[in-house]
Amino acid sequence: MQHTIRHILLADSTESWANLLPLTFTRPCGALRIGIDTIAEKWARLLPGARVECAPGAPYLDELYPHTAAGTETVNIDSTIVPDAALAAAVAVMAPDSVLADSTGKRLAWRGNATATATYPGKVLRISFVYDIFRYNGEVLEADFAAITAGRTSQPLSATNVVVGDPARVFVEPGASAECAVFNVKNGPIYIGRDAEVMEGALLRGPVAVGTASVINMGAKVYGATTLGPHCKVGGEVNNIVMQGYSNKAHDGFLGNAVIGEWCNLGAGCVASNLKNNYVPVKLWNYPAQRFLPTGLQFCGLIMGDHCKAGINTMFNTGTVLGIGVNVHQAGFPRNFVANFSDGGSFAGFDEMPVETFLDTARRVMARRDVALTPAMERAYRAIHAGDYRELL
């Protein structure tokens, strides 16, 4: 039986929000990008009759992500769940005062007073840690490609390009352009977003998603599973990375098995290792534990929060985490975890960046893309700089 669902609230738990830092310093879990679009955008696409909102895990984000309180027509959903059509269909028929749980009993969605529980028998994909974003990006990108392109016709691809595999696995949105590039879709599809550009000599090996107005520079080598959010620029060599949006790695250098936030820039020659010389599994900084925890992954590169900058020829060790507002320069490898608003490098160490210095730079960077640093954003950054998140860890 179909029940009326007009409001979906993607709810962050404190635990999930903290485990997804540093990316969630500046956004709720539901606003994270994986595959082609964000988790919230997937729910809105799968349940088009409902208004989808995010309830952030950090109170200082409420102004940036306003949401209405849950009512009788609200379905609350664990914000770390990446939905598919089957799960969305199960949510769509949830009765009032009910819970939908996975096979282990963990809550997926709940409505009202939640007096009755139903078990969802299908597969559930959760983004529990930041490295899950690149780890599961390929399968999510495949599903998004199928859903977003279903029943639609791609814009024609210029005859100067070469497609290896089924041409139907390349989809080009209106306004996008590509010349003299190679698209290999034998291992996954390639999605080119609206007004994006793939320059001559670029090599793309799917699955790959190039977001709205993003650019693949000349001669770039892009391995799957890679996602570039809107307004990104990539050059050199990348492999299994996810850029949330508005970030650049425009020059030569390698970046692999990485997640990059918004408003970041990696300078010319910047290189990040994704494999330890002794081939042991990588440990990664975990904010709530305040220590490095095992990932179980052999390949794990750079995790970079919003508004980070890396100077030319910067080198990053395997499994490096940068908080937000970090400016790395100087020779050598910085340590594997650099706290928010740090300025410096391995040679002379790091100093704390004054909040006004950070905000001045952020205004200039964002203005280049015709985006304003709003008072609400400024208040959120000031709260992070003041450490208002620490009581949540």
Image: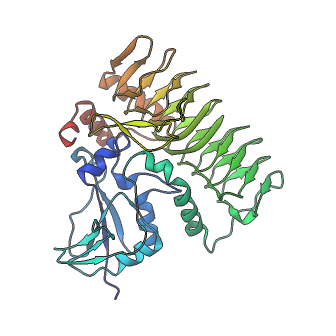
> Which residue appears farthest toward the bottom when viewing the image?
1
Q: Residue 360 occupies which quadrant of the picture? A: top left
Residue 137: x and y in percent read 52, 53
Q: Is residue 14 above or below residue 139?
A: above
* In the rendered image, the vertical position of residue 354 relative to residue 81, given as above or below: above
Residue found at x 40% / y 36%: 284
Residue 309 position, x and y percent, is 47, 28
Q: Residue furthest top?
A: 348
- Kindly tell me whether residue 12 is visible in this rendering: yes
Across and down, in percent, residue 177 comes to 71, 51
Horizontal side of residue 389 vs 90, given as left or right:
left
State the residue at coordinates (46%, 34%): 319
Q: Please indicate whether residue 233 sits to the left or right of residue 316 in the image.
A: right
Position of 341 with respect to 63 (left or right) is: right
Q: Nearer the viewer, residue 120 or 351?
A: 120
Task: Please state which of residues 361 and 182 is positioned toward the viewer in this rendering.
Answer: 182
Quadrant of the image for the C terminus? top left
